[in-house]
Image (cartoon, rainbow, N blue to C red):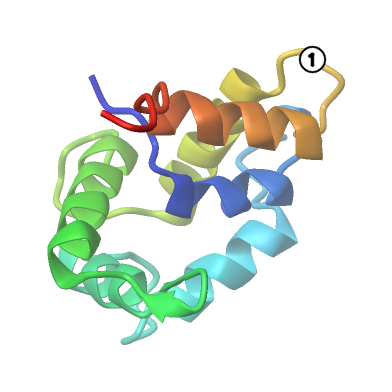
C-alpha cells in the first residue's frame, strides 16, 4: 500500500475539497504541474518527476538520491491513473485531491496545520523508545 511520504504533504495545502468541474485544473496545481513539465509538452514523464523530486529540500538539506527515487516512483505509479506512462494535469489533480480528502479528517475542505502534523506523524510511524 502506498503511503505518501512527508515530502509530498505540502502539496496538500494547495487543494480545496470541491470536486473538479469539467476537469478544470486548480491554478495552484497547474503552476506546480508547469514547474515540473520540463519540456512543456503537457504531460509529466517519470524522468520529469524524478528530476523534480530530486530538487526538493528536506529541511535544510537536499533529499538523499535513493529516497528521492523511492518517492518519485511511488508518486508516479499512483498519479498515472490510466497507466500510460504519463501524468496529465487531471491525473495530478486527482491524486492531490484524493490525498487532501484522506488527510482532511474533519472534511471542512482544508488540510489544517494540525491535520498536516497528524498526517506526518502517521507516515513517520511510532517513534522508537529512547535509550534502547
Q: Nearer the viewer, residue 43 or 110?
A: 110
Give x and y (percent) for residue 69: 16, 61
Quadrant of residue 3 within the rendered picture: top left
Give x and y (percent) for residue 35: 50, 79
Q: Residue furthest front?
A: 131
Q: How packed is label 1: few (under 14 Cα within 10 Å), some, or many (20 or more)?
A: few
Give x and y (percent) for residue 104: 71, 22
The relative height of residue 60 versus residue 19 in the rendered view (above or below) is: below
Residue at the image point whose x is 79% and y is 15% from the top: 107
The image quadrant where one finds the C terminus is: top left
Regarding residue 39, the answer to whether it shows in the image is: yes
Residue at the image point whose x is 15% and y is 45% from the top: 84
Residue at the image point whose x is 45% and y is 54% from the top: 7
Which residue, given by chain and number where applicable, does mark 1 sit on? 107
Give x and y (percent) for residue 117: 66, 35
Q: Is residue 58 left or right of residue 116?
A: left
Q: Is residue 28 left or right of residue 130?
A: right
The image quadrant where one finds the N terminus is: top left
Q: Is residue 110 left or right of residue 34?
A: right
Q: Nearer the viewer, residue 105 or 81?
A: 105
Residue at the image point whose x is 55% and y is 46% from the top: 9
Amino acid at each position: 500500500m502506498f503511503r505518501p511520504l512527508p515530502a509530498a504533504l505540502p502539496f496538500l495545502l494547495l487543494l480545496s475539497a470541491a470536486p473538479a468541474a469539467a476537469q478544470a485544473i486548480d491554478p495552484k496545481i497547474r503552476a506546480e504541474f508547469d514547474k515540473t513539465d520540463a519540456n512543456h509538452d503537457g504531460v509529466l514523464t517519470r524522468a520529469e518527476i524524478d528530476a523534480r523530486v530530486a530538487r526538493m529540500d528536506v529541511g535544510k538539506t537536499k533529499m538523499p538520491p535513493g529516497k528521492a527515487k523511492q518517492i518519485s516512483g511511488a508518486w508516479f505509479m499512483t498519479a498515472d491513473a490510466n497507466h500510460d506512462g504519463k501524468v496529465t494535469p487531471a491525473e495530478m489533480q486527482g491524486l492531490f485531491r484524493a490525498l487532501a480528502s484522506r488527510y482532511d479528517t474533519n472534511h471542512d475542505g482544508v488540510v489544517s496545520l494540525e491535520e498536516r502534523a497528524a498526517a506526518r506523524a502517521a507516515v513517520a510511524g511510532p517513534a522508537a523508545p529512547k535509550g534502547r
